[in-house]
Image: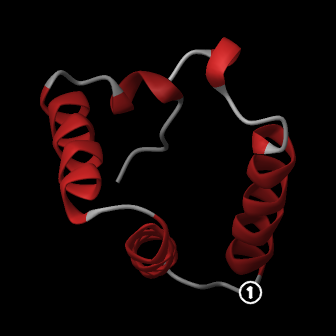
Amino acid sequence: MSNEHAPADLSHAGAVVDKAIEYMVEQKIDSLSIASALLGGALALLARSVADEAIVHILNNAIASVRAGELRHMGEAPR
C-alpha cells in the first residue's frame, strides 16, 4: 500500500500499536507471545472487516515478503 492510499489514521494506529508493544516488552512479555497476540488480533479484526479472499491475499503478500527477506531489513532484532 502506498502512502497515497493509506488511511489518514494509519499513522495514529501505528503509533498506538508501537506504544502497546513497548508496554508489553517493559512487562517482560516474550516477543513471540506479543507478536502472536498482535497477529491474532489483526486477523480477527480483518475477519470482521473484509472477505476471506482479501485476508488470503494479505497473508500471501506477507509470506512473499518473508521469503524475499524484506522483514529482516525492517530493523528486526535478532532472534
Q: Can you tell which quarter of the image residue 19 is in?
A: bottom right
Which quarter of the rendered picture does the C terminus lie within? bottom left
Residue 65 image point, x, y percent: 25, 29
From the viewer's perspective, is 19 left or right of 49? right
- Type of amino acid at the residue the image marks with label 1: Gln
- Asked if 59 appears above or below 43 in the picture, the reply is above
Number of marks:
1
- 68 or 5, nearer to the observer: 5
Say few, some or many: other residues with alpha carbon within 10 Å of mark 1 (under 14 / 14 to 19 / 20 or more).
Answer: few
- Where is 78 relative to 18, above or below? above
Name the colouring of the figure.
Answer: secondary structure
Q: Which image quadrant for residue 63?
A: top left
What residue does disc 1 label?
27
* Left or right of residue 19: residue 34: left
Residue nearer the viewer, 37 or 50: 50
Instruction: Give the side of residue 65 with respect to residue 72, left or right.
Output: left
In x, y percent, where is residue 32? 39, 73
Q: Residue 66 location in percent, x, y?
A: 21, 36
Q: Residue at x 57, y 15 (%)?
A: 2
In terms of secondary structure, where does tag 1 sit? loop
For the point 35% across and 30% down, the residue is: 72
Q: Residue lying furthest front in this view?
A: 51
Residue sitting at x 65%, y 84%: 28
Residue 5 point in image, percent of width and height = 63, 21
58 in relation to 73, above or below:
below
